[in-house]
Structures are given as C-alpha cells and as structure tokens.
Image: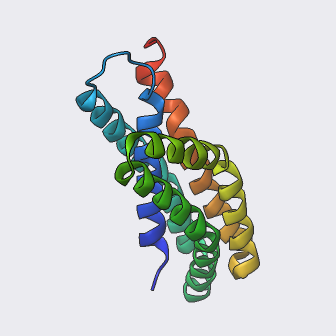
C-alpha cells in the first residue's frame, strides 16, 4: 500500500486545524461557529494547494528517474518512514481532541491546554522526526526531499491563512 493516502489525509486534517488556529481567539463574539468553519475550510484549501507541491515533487522524481520501479519503492519507503513518527503524534492530538469534546467544560478546557497547546508547539519537531524517519527507513535523498516539501507545506498553512484573512482581526 502506498503511504501517500494516509499522509495526504493527515496533511489535510492538519491544514484544517491550522486554518482554525489562524482564526481562533481573534473574535470576541460568543457564537462564532460559521467563521470558525470558514477558517477551517480556508486552511484546508490552502493546505491542499501547498501539498500539491510535494505531490509534484514526487511525480517529477518519478518521471526523471532512470528506474521508475526502484524510485517508486524508495519513495514508498520514505513515505512509510515519514508516517511512523506521525502516528503517535496524531494519536495524541486525537486523544486530546476527544477529551476536549467529551469531558465537562473545565476538564475539556484543561485537556486542551495541557494537550493541544504543547502538541501545536511540537508540530515542527514532528515534521523533523518524519523527515528523519523517511531517510532512516530507506527513502534516501528523494524521500527526504518529498518529506521536507510536504512538511514545509503543512507548517506554512497557518501563517499564510492568518496573513491573508485574519491579520487585521483582533
């Protein structure tokens, strides 16, 4: 199985959350469901566009490679290696979100502060661990290149969404 599908899914979910984070806390209205959904969709759209860069990088590597099968196997190994450190990170985020949505208000807020706050700060380290995993799992330079482009893409979503739509919102 190709790791591209789960990696793309994780990237788009991260982009959705990044769009929401770009907006969250910038509006004093109590009922802000629609703007929050709009911000999440903006993050998803920006993330999808940015993640195309990693797909195009992989396609270009495959098209220019002398041995397509070997390059595909190398990219698949790199993708699996990139995915390995992201699985526990995504599980921790999912657990924190589940606690936030299921626990009473105070406990859910505590789960958000203790869980999602630090996990958001650890995103660049998770991407770096993914890049290292891509190399160590046999992805080589091509796996590292595609992983670095994808990692850079997901890390750029929140600043781009914030700068484009929410810079002036206080």
Q: Is residue 148 above or below residue 29?
A: below
Q: Position of residue 106 (x, y in %)?
A: 45, 39
Residue 83, image quadrant: bottom right
Q: Residue at x 68, y 77 (%)?
A: 139
Q: Nearer the viewer, residue 99 or 139?
A: 99
Q: Position of residue 28 (x, y in %)?
A: 37, 15
In-image side of 167 versus 71 (left or right) = left
Viewport quadrant of the N terminus: bottom left
Q: Nearer the viewer, residue 81 or 35?
A: 35
Q: Is residue 50 above or below residue 142?
A: above
Q: Residue at x 47, y 30 (%)?
A: 22
Q: Residue at x 71, y 72 (%)?
A: 133
In-image side of 129 versus 2 (left or right) = right
Q: How is the image coloured?
A: rainbow
Q: Position of residue 6 (x, y in %)?
A: 44, 70
Q: Position of residue 13 (x, y in %)?
A: 41, 54
Q: Is residue 125 above or below residue 31?
A: below
Q: Is residue 73 above or below residue 99?
A: below
């Amino acid at each position: 199985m190709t790791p591209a599908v789960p990696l793309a899914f994780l990237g788009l979910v991260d982009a959705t959350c990044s769009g929401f984070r770009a907006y969250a806390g910038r509006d004093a209205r109590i009922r802000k469901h629609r703007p929050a959904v709009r911000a999440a969709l903006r993050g998803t759209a920006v993330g999808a566009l940015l993640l195309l860069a990693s797909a195009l990088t992989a396609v270009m590597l495959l098209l220019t490679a002398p041995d397509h099968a070997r390059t595909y196997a190398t990219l698949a190994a790199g993708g699996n290696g990139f995915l390995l450190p992201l699985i526990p990170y995504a599980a921790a985020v999912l657990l924190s979100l589940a606690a936030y949505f299921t626990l009473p208000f105070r406990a859910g807020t505590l789960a958000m502060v203790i869980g999602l706050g630090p996990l958001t700060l650890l995103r660049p380290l998770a991407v770096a661990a993914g890049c290292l995993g891509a190399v160590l799992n046999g992805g080589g330079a091509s796996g590292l290149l595609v992983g670095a482009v994808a990692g850079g893409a997901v890390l750029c979503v929140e600043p781009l969404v914030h700068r484009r739509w929410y810079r002036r919102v206080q």
